[in-house]
Amino acid sequence: MSLMKTRRGKWFLLITVMVLSLAVLSGCAPSAAVTHTTEDLKNGGFWQSNVVYYFAIALDKFADWFNGEYGLAVLVMVIIVRTLILPLTIKQVKSSRAMQAIQPELQKIQKKYKDTPEKVQQETMRLFQENKVNPMAGCLPLIVQMPIFIALYNSIYYNPHLREHSFLWLELGKPDHLFILPVLAALTTFIQTRMMTKMNPMQQQGPMQFMMMIYPVLIFVMSYNFPAALPLYWVYSNIYTIVQNYFLYRNNDKHKLAIASAVKSTDDSTAVKSKGGSKASKGAKKSK
């Protein structure tokens, strides 16, 4: 029961983050006739002057490395951002493996205390703590990336060089209505989520199956309507994730076996408690 609540809570949080981000993105864009420049951000509010401004400046600097090529500047931005959050991703992978490894123990708890939900919750939390499992760890990389993505979205509108820049067949400041980039963004998103479900059997259930079907559709719709620089960011980020996950999960079975052998069993904990109790009772009898 508590495990199901934890999973539902995790997916509710992920979906909430996505919906809120969509709402912010659709509401924070300036009007169609954009006349602002990067320097105007200095006189804006806290978010614009302290976050978006530096993203816009960073994109300019990265573009200078490639003779003004902003399509490659977005790639550099992806590599830097994803590398910075790599420790969080590694932590997520470890937590995911540990969660899979403790499944037999969770099932024991649910079977043993099926008539006492509070005890199930208590024992489940104890099992998580003893085995250093954080069921919400999978949310961290997404939550960290959302402010970055929103800042990138704003910096595009306030950067006249990027708005007017062409990269391959794209005008980075305008949507790609040839469908090429939206299809690529949706396809790489599907491959990424499909890859995750194969590597983590727990995610082949309920919410993840739903996300695997609906998320690429959302990405396609957003990519068709947003400036091309944003779905380009998605495509780069998805490719990075696919390569990253290949290396992180390639020895997944071996890692899971190692973690499973180190899992602290509920039976062991119960045995320790019972031994402690029996010793205490023996001591009491001797004192009498």
Image (spheres, helix red, strand yellow):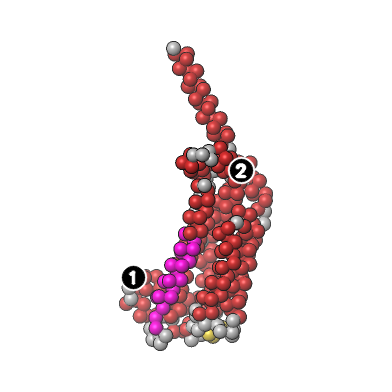
Q: What residue type is labelled 1?
A: Phe
Range covered by the magenta-colored residues:
13-31
Q: Are marks 2 and 1 in contact (CB under 8 Å)?
A: no
Q: Distance between the residues labelled 2 and 1?
A: 49 Å
- Tell me the quadrant of the picture where the C terminus can be found: top left
* Helix, strand or loop for the magenta stretch, by majority: helix
- Tag on residue 203? none
Q: Which of 5 and 188 is in front in this view?
A: 5
Residue lying at the far front of the rendered structure:
115
Q: Is residue 34 above or below residue 263?
A: below
Specify whether 58 is left or right of 40: right
Residue 209 picture location, percent across and down: 59, 61
Q: Residues within 10 Å of mark 1 (few under 14, many from 20)?
A: few
Residue 264 in sight from this viewpoint = no
Name the residue: 43% across, 67% down: 20
The residue labelled by disc 1 is 46
Who comes first in sequence, dot 2 or dot 1?
A: 1
Q: Measured from the top left, where is residue 157 in percent x and y?
A: 43, 80
Residue drawn at x 33%, y 70% is: 46
Residue located beneath label 2 in the image: 104
